[in-house]
């Protein structure tokens, strides 16, 4: 008879254990969800950073052929012609947003694209029809013409044309990606109205 009034806690102990187990499972599930979410977010951001870094570090413009200068006055080069193409797998380059910098012994001039008003223009040579003229895309080839007599804004234009044996540097800066730098030396003789490849 006495045993009837004793507390038998076997059932309650199992129920309590089940509740604690469920609580641990729920807490662990929420914690793992939060940790996995944070991990996926971090991985995604890291991927974006790497992709942006590669895009900014790699140039989408490559030289394609000789750099040619034209002598417009005796022993001076007045025009420079550069052929460029898109690198393999490179993103299209908007030439309207491209900046060109010209440097020689006594000049440092930067010019944005403004038709031919700033002394340089581009012409498609190998061009896929149906695409925008201003985009240098994969497989295309463009000619860049720099007229050094009018190159640059009026406030900062080329003071003296490059002469014989003078070193020049042309930097082509797209709106996105690395700068294409071309360094050449003028030939030892420049006859008027003649064209010369430079190396």
Image (spheres, helix red, strand yellow):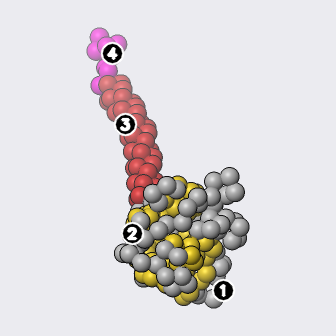
Closer to the camera, 78 or 100?
78
How far from the left and from the top, in percent, is residue 151?
Answer: 62, 65
Front: mark 1 or 2: 2
Tell me the crowding category of disc 3: few under 14, some 14 to 19, or many 20 or more residues within 10 angstroms, Cα based.
few
Would you identify the image quadrant in which residue 127 lies? bottom right
Label 2 sits on residue: 165
Residue 132, how many percent across, how many down? 66, 78
Magenta-span inclusion, residue 174: no
Q: Nearer the viewer, residue 141 or 38?
A: 141
Q: Residue at x 62, y 58 (%)?
A: 157
- Residue 28 tag number: 3
Q: How far apart are the alpha carbons under marks 4 and 3?
A: 34 Å
* Label 4 secondary element: loop
* Magenta-drawn segment: 1-10
Q: Is residue 176 above or below residue 39?
A: below
Q: Are marks 4 and 2 in contact (CB under 8 Å)?
A: no
Q: Are marks 3 and 1 in contact (CB under 8 Å)?
A: no
**Element under disc 2:** loop
* Of pointers 4 and 1, the one earlier in the residue sequence: 4
Q: Residue tagged by mark 4?
A: 7
CA distance separating discs 1 and 2: 43 Å
Closer to the eye: label 4 or 1: 1
**What is the C-alpha distance between the residues marked 3 and 2?**
75 Å
At x 51%, y 72%, the residue is 76
The residue tagged 1 is 130
């Amino acid at each position: 008879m006495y045993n009837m009034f004793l507390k038998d806690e076997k059932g309650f102990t199992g129920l309590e254990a089940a509740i604690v187990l469920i609580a641990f499972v729920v807490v662990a599930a929420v914690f793992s969800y939060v940790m996995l979410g944070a991990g996926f977010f971090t991985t995604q951001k890291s991927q974006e950073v790497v992709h942006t870094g590669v895009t900014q570090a790699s140039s989408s413009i490559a030289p394609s052929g000789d750099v040619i200068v034209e002598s417009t006055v005796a022993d001076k080069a007045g025009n420079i012609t550069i052929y460029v193409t898109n690198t393999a797998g490179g993103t299209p380059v908007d030439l309207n947003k491209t900046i060109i910098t010209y440097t020689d012994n006594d000049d440092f001039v930067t010019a944005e694209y403004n038709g031919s008003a700033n002394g340089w223009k581009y012409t498609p040579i190998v061009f896929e029809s149906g695409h925008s003229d201003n985009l240098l895309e994969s497989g295309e080839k463009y000619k860049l013409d720099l007229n050094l007599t009018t190159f640059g804004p009026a406030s900062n234009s080329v003071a003296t044309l490059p002469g014989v044996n003078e070193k020049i540097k042309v930097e082509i800066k797209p709106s996105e990606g690395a700068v294409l730098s071309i360094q050449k030396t003028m030939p030892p003789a420049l006859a008027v109205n003649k064209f010369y490849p430079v190396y």
